[in-house]
Image (cartoon, rainbow, N blue to C red):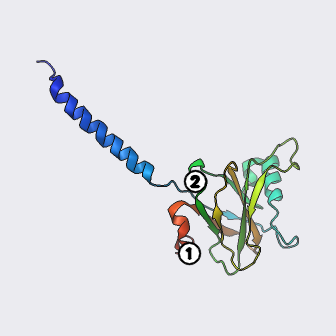
Amino acid sequence: MGVNRNRLTPLAAILALSLLLGLSAAEAKPAGQKVTDIVRNATGFFSGQCRFEAHRIAMLEGGEAANGQVGYSFEVKRATVGQKFLLGPPDPRIDDFDIAFYESLGDPLDPLKMPERMIFDDARGSSTIERGRVPRDLPVAIVCLFIAEHPVTFTYVTGPEANLTTVLYP
C-alpha cells in the first residue's frame, strides 16, 4: 500500500495555512509587560527627589539580593518600546513611585559613573501615577519609592492595559 501524495498536498496546505493564520493573529496583538513587586524603603524623604543611584549602586555591589530594598529594577521587554506605560502604588493618595529607564545599571568597576537615563516623575505633584511611553535604547527600568513610611507594592504595566487605570486599582 503506497502513500497517495495527491491527498497529502491539500492537507499539508491546510495545515500550513492554519499555522500561518495563527501566527499572524498572535503578531497583531501588541505585546505587553506587567511587573508587580515591592520596594521596602523610600529614598525621597530628605533629598526631595528619588535617589535612583542608591538602587543602581546597591545592585552593582550587592547583586540581586539588593533588589527591592531602595528600589526595584527589571529588564524592559523590547517589544514594549514606544508603548504607553503606567506605574503606581496600591493607594495613590499616600504612596508615590517614580521610574527611570537606563541603558544599563552601569559599570561595577566605576559605580559612580552614571549611564544614560530618562526619568519619569510627576513634578507637579498632582498624581502619584507615572505614565509615559517606554523609551528606545534604555532597556533597564528602576522603580523608586519616593515617599512612604512602609514597604509598598507597585505595578508597572504596558500595552493595551496601560490605558486603563483599573489595572492598577481594580
Residue found farthest to the left: 1
Image vertical order of residue 47 relative to residue 79, above or below: below
Marks 1 and 2 in Cβ contact (< 8 Å)? no
Give the image location of residue 57, x and y in percent: 83, 52
Q: Secondary structure at mark 2?
A: helix
Q: Residue at x 14, y 23 (%)?
A: 4
Q: Residue at x 77, y 73 (%)?
A: 123
Count of marks overlaid on the render: 2
From where the camera sits, is residue 156 visible?
A: no
- Looking at the rendered structure, which numbered label has been put on residue 10? none
- Looking at the rendered structure, which numbered label has been put on residue 80? 2
From where the camera sits, is residue 53 visible?
A: yes
Give the image location of residue 92, x and y in percent: 66, 77
Report the residue marked by disc 1: 169
Image quadrant in which the N terminus is located: top left
Q: Residue at x 72, y 49 (%)?
A: 64
Q: Secondary structure at mark 1?
A: loop
Alpha carbon distance from label 1 to label 2: 22 Å
Q: Tell me the kind of residue under disc 2.
A: Thr
Give the image location of residue 46, x and y in percent: 88, 72
